[in-house]
Image (tube, helix red, strand yellow):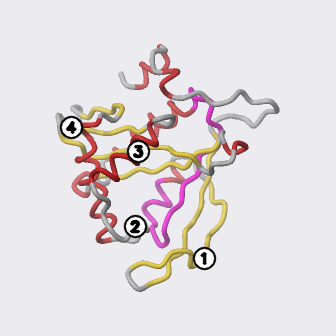
Amino acid sequence: MTDSLTIRLVHPEDYSGILDIYAPYIQHTAISFEYDVPSFDDFSRRIEEVIAFHPWLIAAIKDQIIGYAYAGKHRTRKAYQWSVESSVYIAADYHGRGIGKVLYQALFQVLRLQGIINVYAGITLPNIKSESFHTAMGFTPVGIYHAVGYKFEEWHDVLWMEMSLHHHTNLPPAPRSWHEIEKTDDFQKIFE
């Protein structure tokens, strides 16, 4: 990792750089189950939908976006409001430098402040690096969806992993939007 690395909230001018990182995962891997790279407008709408409530963080060196992480709804029913799915993507030239770890640590700090309790991650198998990474971050396996996705003329399994950010208690307060907590000292400290 480098001293000039910055972790911050996403801005609209970042969307193109984020799509540039994501596109090769669509085009050349089964890590993403998308077949086609979304248009810039479609991708921008996706980001806007996520950041209406949940955080989307980017890693940058100077003005170059080299990675991103975000959390979105796990499911839409109200009983799932304390649960999110997380994703992290790093530009190919920056793999293995600890950037994903730093992004996830910041993301999980924001989620804790929001009152999110459960984080889930789906990993297309085989992907030893992602499994090891998520295990090191504190995730544990839940189960495998067998042959759940078909891409590149092959069926793929998906391993689901989970992590708790808080203890499960009765009568948990409803999670707050990141917008509701962004002016707090605890929130600001995450990005210092």
Asked where in the image residue 3 lies, by quadrant, the reply is top left
Quarter that holds the C terminus: top left
Q: Secondary structure at mark 4?
A: strand
Which amino acid type is marked by label 2? Glu
In the rendered image of this protein, does residue 180 appear above or below residue 48? above
For marks 2 and 1 on the same chain, the one whose residue lies earlier in the sequence: 2
Does the magenta-highlighted stretch encompass residue 162?
no
* Kind of residue at disc 3: Ala
Residue 78 place in picture, x, y as percent: 70, 42
Residue 146 circle label: 1
Bounds of the magenta span? 112-133
Name the residue beneath numbered marker 3.
69
> Percent x, y for residue 85?
55, 49
**Residue at the disc numbered 2:** 34
Badge 4 or badge 2: first in the primary sequence: 2
Q: CA distance from mark 2 to mark 1?
A: 18 Å
Separation (CA) of disc 3 from disc 2: 18 Å
Give the structural element (helix, strand or loop) at label 1.
strand
Which is nearer the eye, 102 or 32? 32
Residue bearing the label numbered 4? 61
